[in-house]
Amino acid sequence: MTVAIVTDSAASLPESVATEAKVAVVPMWLNLGSTPIRDGELSLEEISIRLDDGFSTSGPTPGEFVEAVTAADRGDGVLLLTLSSSMSSTFTTARLAAGMVEGVRVAVLDTGTAAGAQGLVVLAAAAKAATGASLEEVEAAARKACGEVRLVATLPNLEHLARGGRVPGAAAWASRWLNLHPIFEFRRGRVRPLRPARGPRSARERVLATWAGTYVEGAALHVAVMHALDEQAAEALLAEVRRRVEPATAFICSFSPVMVAHTGPGLVGLAWRWEV
């Protein structure tokens, strides 16, 4: 028996990666106009076309988390990892759900991040669980990964971030960076702007340079390349990473529709951690 791992769909884990790691993913919700849509039910193309209709997002319900935890449990407990509590109430809902589950030990962890970075934390927990570690040891491994993971991305503009209001100061950045490609880092629950670039190629080069500047001699690299309707750019970015270092873990992930609702299309970025 091993500790089971459950997360929400903001982690943007490709289905094949989640299945191989034995991770259960609970879909979040996107409300387009008055229509509730489970994350993954519509393609990113369909979501992007309808964003101007008005939208809101929400995490899984307590009942959905209870159902997922109960189904995932193998007898050694469950670690439930959520996107950052600074972005969503999903962590609070997950804690409520954990208290509703009977007969199962459940630990809940706020990863402090989202998207590919959240996915890397989830995979670190799953790898530790696969060794037969205890729930406490698996949670400790996940907390360590939370402190190591980085996420840097670029967008064509900040219109959607500013409109959604989830990122303090995004509206001011948008006006200040008019006609520039913004670059931002999301780490430990905080989004902060980095120096913008003139044009998409320059922006991606700057994202790559930020990653390269964190190189740790002798450490294993775990990397997720994220995109929102720009898979070609993501593939090129991963190829550049591999020219420098061969990762221990590497995958390309499409931003989940719930995340794209806040960022808009065109995002490209890197999430990574160096494991010593």
Image: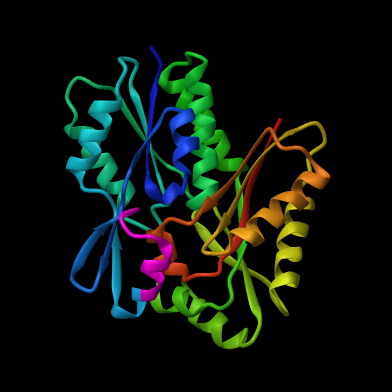
Is residue 188 visible to us here?
no
Magenta stretch containing residue 211, yes or no?
A: no
- Where is 148 relative to 105, above or below? below
Quadrant in which residue 266 is drawn:
bottom right
Where residue 64 appears, as percent x and y from the top left, is 21, 42
Would residue 90 appear left or right of 44 to someone viewing this image? left
Q: How many marks?
A: 0
Q: Which residues are magenta?
A: 39-49
Where residue 178 appears, as percent x and y from the top left, is 61, 87
Q: Residue at x 38, y 53 (%)?
A: 85
Q: Residue at x 49, y 19 (%)?
A: 130
Residue 184 or 20: which is nearer the viewer?
20
Where residue 270 appears, as percent x and y from the top left, is 63, 54
Quadrant in which residue 73 is drawn:
top left
Is residue 252 visible to us here?
yes
Q: Quadrant of the C terminus?
A: top right
Q: Residue at x 33, y 47 (%)?
A: 91
Quadrant in which residue 232 is drawn:
bottom right
Q: Quadrant of the N terminus?
A: top left
Would residue 86 appear left or right of 209 to someone viewing this image? left
Q: Residue at x 78, y 58 (%)?
A: 209
Would residue 77 appear left or right of 147 to someone viewing this image? left
Would residue 194 appear left or right of 165 to someone viewing this image? right
Where residue 241 appears, as percent x and y from the top left, is 75, 48
Magenta stretch containing residue 46, yes or no?
A: yes
Residue 91 or 68: which is nearer the viewer?
68
